[in-house]
Structure formats: structure tokens, C-alpha cells
Image (tube, coloured by chain):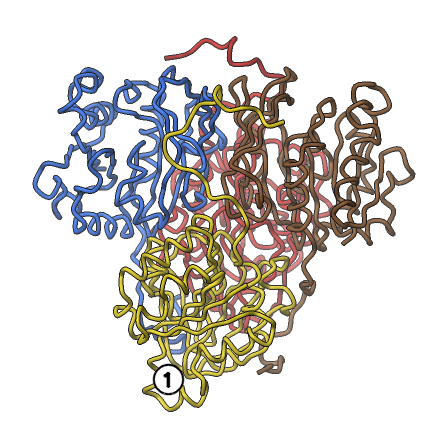
Chain colours: A blue, B brown, C yellow, D red
Amino acid sequence: MKVTVWNENRHEQKNPDVRKAYPKGIHGAIAGFLEQNGYEVSGATLDEPEHGLTDEVLNNTDVLFWWGHIAHDEVDDAVVEKIKQRVLSGMGLIVLHSGHLSKIFRALMGTSCDLKWREADERERIWVCNPGHPIAEGVGENIELSKEEMYGEHFDIPAPDELVFISWFEGGEVFRSGCTFRRGKGKIFYFRPGHETYPTYHNPEIQRVLLNAVKWAKPSANPTPVYGNAKPLETISVKD
Amino acid sequence: MKVTVWNENRHEQKNPDVRKAYPKGIHGAIAGFLEQNGYEVSGATLDEPEHGLTDEVLNNTDVLFWWGHIAHDEVDDAVVEKIKQRVLSGMGLIVLHSGHLSKIFRALMGTSCDLKWREADERERIWVCNPGHPIAEGVGENIELSKEEMYGEHFDIPAPDELVFISWFEGGEVFRSGCTFRRGKGKIFYFRPGHETYPTYHNPEIQRVLLNAVKWAKPSANPTPVYGNAKPLETISVKD
Amino acid sequence: MKVTVWNENRHEQKNPDVRKAYPKGIHGAIAGFLEQNGYEVSGATLDEPEHGLTDEVLNNTDVLFWWGHIAHDEVDDAVVEKIKQRVLSGMGLIVLHSGHLSKIFRALMGTSCDLKWREADERERIWVCNPGHPIAEGVGENIELSKEEMYGEHFDIPAPDELVFISWFEGGEVFRSGCTFRRGKGKIFYFRPGHETYPTYHNPEIQRVLLNAVKWAKPSANPTPVYGNAKPLETISVKD
Amino acid sequence: MKVTVWNENRHEQKNPDVRKAYPKGIHGAIAGFLEQNGYEVSGATLDEPEHGLTDEVLNNTDVLFWWGHIAHDEVDDAVVEKIKQRVLSGMGLIVLHSGHLSKIFRALMGTSCDLKWREADERERIWVCNPGHPIAEGVGENIELSKEEMYGEHFDIPAPDELVFISWFEGGEVFRSGCTFRRGKGKIFYFRPGHETYPTYHNPEIQRVLLNAVKWAKPSANPTPVYGNAKPLETISVKD
């Protein structure tokens, strides 16, 4: 299992608070606990050539994390298209927090992926609404974060294949915080928390969710479907 | 369109606060705004013979409302089985609030339908998470109720076919408040609010949701599927 | 209710068999039975300026039909983007047959939308697998077409919100033939049959499905969600 | 992982053809390939005390297979209720073929679970319509069985959470052959093939599907949700 953690890595350069919360960058923090759990992990960032996502990297990635926020528009369309094809071919994709507006997530969803938000140091409670789901394994009834950015409904996504978490916010909003989607042979998990100024990715319960998500999103060893002109039954030999 | 509003009608007999909120009973309040909107409506209650749900009543009901709470166990199993067969044959069913633990809802869901609850006069905000759904038509972004009983996740239901509303509660919980399910040819809508001591069913926005739900749940004029031993293609004449 | 029927209208110009099956074009045939059922209908075709889909036309369309096949690439990206925004804002979209590879359908689905196909004059049986669905209203257990093009699984779409029809083909394939999707406030229905050389759109049962689909896909009068920076609960006055 | 394979085991006693196809019973055949793949497997049959499903057996079962046909009515309601509670608590359940009419499946689905059928030695092709699903891992585009009983739509089940396989039959029918459902904390997989007079469970591709299903259905180590009267947020200490 090879995991690539992609991070825009711009807030870390500009904002000392973010650097303090994530001295090795958000990608570094995520790579850290993944490595401690036995995964082979690489980081990739916006300002590298091809955003660090060369064909070789993408073709050797089983699960890709995506964190972006202020520079979605700077991601090259050709790279987005390549990621999309890899997801449809089976690569897992875990989209974090403000990645909801990334080109890759919007291209795979087909909707605006817009939402309400507020930065007000609000308490968040992430409730499990699918208690037998593998992504919620080992998580309690809810995960409580003392301070986070608020994201609120309506979240303009297609109805998720599975809804795993719903968030409650102090200021009066709710949000579908953990959503799974299948697209082609690939599995996608969107997970809400993780604003850059809070130490969210250091929280052991958040880490547990992300570790579960990696396991869940790993590619299946299914043959790729054959599309196009097909022969009829008569010409196919029966197998049994 | 004939609508039957079934109500346990026990709180009304015992508790003056409930009688004050609903002088004609909860069923009377619901029947009232349905009639004002042109529906032919009857009430039916637990203590009538066959709970008011004779074969004649059930066979002439297009959409059935269900409100029950403290006497679920007193509902006769034979009546429950008849209601279930009518739903599978196409009758719409709208289950309200504490009806989540009714025999009919649990029989159609196959799960415990259990949940968390608290009576603490809490503020509730019912958010629309499916803004193009006909049951949310004409409703704003959320419906705010100043005081209601809290219901919280996990709500032990099958994943709803469509999730229309999610509630936020002052005390820290969320709840899947508006859920649709199809069972056989019938459409089912579960709607959370409506604790007996609050004037919830007098709220015009709540009424709007229920009016929309009646329209949505009405039976389709589809032929009933034929089950059992079937002839193969060769013996069926082509229609076109 | 205003319906616009968009047709590529190229086969009709090149192939006398298609002209024979559809003397007024595929769009003319569809417009015909829609008008007979009381809808206000306009046609629009690829070779008109802006493909016949000006802002005025789009903004006044409640439900858009889409039939395309050999010239998907010639549809202007700017027009596709406008249609997509209209769907997300609530316009219904009915995608027919080879429209599965249209730019607009792929943009809304986020997948390749590819499939297996074969032109071999095969018998098709379109089975209802959701007998209470409004799009199947008045349709029998299946619709049998004596000759159609085959489309087979795997059909590379997101799991549909509702699966209404599954097709059986003589040569050994199956296909998810009637699928609903919600995107933003808009409703989308994909319906498989309708190869240009067969008189499929003259079949009364096929017409019945499409008439049902128009009713189902009509925009709801729901307020548009507000996205972006939101005020917290404390500043919002309670409505009830 | 402990697997219990429950089989009605009546056809095997009465019909020499079934004994020939399954000398050790259908449960013996299934237990055989599960054991070869490293699972700890027990059989249980209708005519044992408590149908072989004592509290001790059920409480130690991670995944339960269910094959029944002609004696559904003889299964004790109290045992059915215990199985249902175990599924809601997390035990996986794999329902095979004619088990669609078993008491346990119908109790968990809430519908009639009826369907069309025909015994005519027809060819069946089971198509994968969800190529990234773990239950389809290692399976080709379709599984072809030269002779099986036909099952046809409409299959009266709730919309499955995931549709993995659709069957094609020589005589003109289609069927949703591989369906997943979550109920409570438990995962349920229904798989169509396996009429008693055909050697279906000796087919390596069918075995592969069932092995995948066991892995998929295994219980998650999630805490059991707490239901009932709940304390508000203020009294709960923040965890992070």
C-alpha cells in the first residue's frame, strides 16, 4: 500500500500559526501517523513540478490524500484529469476539509460542492450515523473538537453512497462530514475537519478515522471492465 | 386523495398541557390543515374498534399518518400486518415523531429504530439537505422551533433512500429528521418533530412539509407486479 | 411547464433510414407526443447558433431532453457549462440513449459513462424494478422492443439515486436502463432506448415513460441555498 | 473469524439428485471451501435442537450463511428473533438463493421479498455492475452458469445499499442478484444462485464471491451506540 499525501502547502509558508500547528506541514503531519501505522507514504505539494504528481507517482499511488484551500485554481487541469482517470481506474481518494472546492473533487462530483462556513473557534461534534461502517471502526459515538471552522448545510454534493458522520456546530449548523462515493473502480471519502489553524490532524480519533479510510479506499483487484463493441452470447464459450 | 390520520390519543386524555396545545387532539390538528388544503381526511384512534382501521378504512386510504408514543404495545398485531400489506401495495405512510418505535414502522424497517432523546425545551433547527426534493418545496433553508424534545443519533434505521432534513439541537446532538423509504409499491416518510407538549403541528412551515409529504406519498397507478412461476420469453408475444 | 428537446440532428441528414423512422427528426417525434399531452415544447439542434440553447431558451426551460451521438465533441464547452449551471439551479434533464457520452451528462456524473454496445437488431425487454416509482406509472411489468441496439454493463456511472428499469438483451447482456440522479436542485433521468434507426420513440409505452419523466423532473419551487460566510445562531431571530 | 453455515438440509434427504450434487449437504459444500481458505466453520441445520443455533453458537458466530427453501415456516420465531438481534449487533449475514423467503431475511427487509421463478435449466449470466466492490474482487466481467433456476424481477426488496451483480437469464428475465444491506451494526449480502439440483456452489467463481462476502460482512469493532435518555452537551467534558 503506497499512500501519497498532497498538500497545497501555502498557508504553512505565510502564517506562523499554521507553521506552529503543523511544523512539517499538514502533509507532514498526516504522513507521520500513516508511517507509524506501517504505510509507505510520500508527500507532494503544489509548488513542485507537476505538483509532485508525475505519472510515476500517480501510477504507484494506491490512496491519495488531498488538502487544498487558497490555490485551487493554480492546480493544472492536465494533472487534475490524470488524477481523475486514476481514481476511475481504482486509486482511492481522500479529500480533506477545504478540498471540497478542489478541481478534482468537483470534477468527480459534478456539482458545485459549495457550503456555508464561519471561522469563529466553534465547538464541533462529529456524530457517527453508520456505526457498523469500517471507517467508523474504533471511534466512539462522536468525536468532539473544542475549536474548528464551521461548515454548514446545504453541502452541494450528490447524495453520498454512504453517510458515515454528521457534524454539529455550536453556532447552529449541521453538516454531512463523512461521505463515501464510488466513481468508476475508485473509492472516494470526503472528511470535513482540518482547518489549517487548529491541531485537528494531531487528534488521535481523527487519525483513527483517516487510517480506517485508507484501508477502506485501497484499490480492489478487480479486472477493468471492457467497454465498446461487444460480441453476443452465441460466440462466447460457456465456462462451467 | 383520502388521508387517514391515526393518533394514539392517550396523552390528550391524561395531560391538560397536551389538551391545551391540541384541543381537538393531535389528529384533529393535522386533519385541520389537511382539510383546509382540499384533502378528504378522517381521524382514527387507538381506542376505537380495530383502532379505527377497519378493512374498509384501510382500503380507502391513500396516505396514512401515524402518531403514537406510550401505547405502541397495545396496537394489535393483526392490524399492523394489514397496514403493512397496504403499504407494500402502494398506500403512503407518514410516520411522525415518537412513531419511530411503533410496530408498523419497525416492521417495515427491520431495525430497532431506537435513538437518543431528552426533554429539555431545547431549540431545534431542521436543515434542508436536499433542496430540490418535493417534500422541501417552499421551505426555507431551515425550520427553527424554539422548543422541542431532542432526538439524537445514532438513529437505528436502514440508510434512507433519500435524506431530506437533518436536525440540530441546542444540547449538542444531530438527527436525520426527514427520511424517505420505499417498501414494495408504497412510499414512507419519517418526520421527527411533534412532541405532544409543544405546538409544533400548528407551525406553518411544519404544515407545509406535511402537505408536501402527502403529495409525494400518494400511490402511483402502477400495475402490481406478478410473482411466482413465470413463463419464458418464447411463449410471450412481442408487443410492438 | 416549458420543455426543450435538443437533438444533434445529424443522422437525420445523412441516413435515409433515420429520416424514414423520424421524418421530423428525433426531436420532432418527441416534441409531438409531448405537445399532444399539453406541454409547451421547442426543439433545438446542434447546427443552430449556440446550438439553439441561448440564455433566453435555457432560462425559460423547465425540462431539457438531450439526444446526441456522433458529434458530442462539437458541442461548445461554454454551452455545456451553462446547461450544467441550469441543472444545478433546478432545471430537469432527460438524457436519452447515446447521450450517455455527451459532455453534459459526463460533466454531471464525473465518470466516463462508458458501456458495451452492439448493433444486431436484438430484442430488448425493459423490466420495471421499482414498481412504485412515478416514472414507471402506468407501465406494465416490462416494455418489450422487438429490435434495438444493445447496451451492456458495466455502465460506468455513479450508483444512481434510484434504479427504475433494467434491460435484458437477446445476446446475453443486462443494463441499468432507467436511472435517476439529483445534482444541486436539478433532477436527471437517463433512459436507454432510442437508437436512431428504430422507431422506438413512436412506441406508446416508451412515450409514457418519457411523459412520466417530464412530470418527475420538473423544478421544485424551493429557495436556492445560500452559500458562503454565515452568521451564527445567536444573531438569527427565532421564527416561531 | 468464525463462520456458521445454516442449511435447511431437507432436499438432501429426499432427492437423490441433490445428494449427488452435494454429498455432504449444501452446508458441507460451502463449509468445505471456506475451511480450505482458513476460516473456522461449523454447520447447523433445521432438524437439530434450536436448529443448531443455540445462544452459544450465535454469540460465537461472526458471519452466518443461510440456505433454506421448503421449510421456512418450520423455523422457530424465537430463533429468528435471536438471529435478528445478533445481526443488528454486528454479525454478518449471507442469504443464499431461496433464502429470500426465509423469515430472517423478510424480518430484516420489511418487504415480501417475493420474485418470479422458473425451473427450466436456463443459462444464467451474472454481470458485475459495481466493478470496484470488494465482493466482486477477482471476478471477471460476468460469471456464466450453464444451468440454473431463473429468478426474475420484480424482486420485492428495499433498494439495496449497493447493487453488485445483475443476472441475465436465457428465458428473458433480469434479476438484482447481488445486493448489500446494512441493518444496525450488521452487514447483509444476498446472493441469488444456488438451486439445490445444480452444482453451483462447486463453481470456483461462485466460491470466490462467497469468500469475498465473508470478508466484507465480518463485524466491525465499533462501540455499540447508546440509546435512550441522553445528557446535554454542557455536562460532557471535552475530549481534546
**In the image: residue D40, left or right of residue A97:** right
**In the image: residue A157, left or right of residue A194:** right
Instruction: Give how far across and how far down residue B114 sits, in percent.
Output: 63, 28
- Determine the image quadrant of residue B13: top right
The chain carrying label 1 is C
**In the image: residue C193, left or right of residue B224:** left
**Which residue, as the protein is rendered here, is positioned at the far right?**
B49
Instruction: Give how far across and how far down residue C217 sits, in percent.
Output: 52, 58
- Residue at 32%, 75% in the rendered image: C48
What residue sits right under mark 1 in the picture? C12
Of C224 and D186, the residue lying toward us: C224
The vertical placement of A67 against B92, above or below, is above
Of B164 and D75, the residue lying toward us: B164
Instruction: Give how far across and how far down residue C171 sits, in percent.
Output: 43, 76
**In the image: residue A93, left or right of residue D116:** left
Query: Type of residue at label 1?
Result: Glu
- Residue at 34%, 23% in the rendered image: A119
Instruction: Give how far across and how far down residue A190 sits, in percent.
Output: 35, 36
- Residue D51 visible: yes
- Determine the image quadrant of residue A1: top left
Helix, strand or loop at disc 1?
helix
Of C108 and A172, the residue lying toward us: A172
- Residue at 54%, 19% in the rendered image: B170
Q: Quadrant of the C terminus of chain B?
A: bottom right
**Which residue, as the protein is rendered here, is positioned at the far front?**
C56
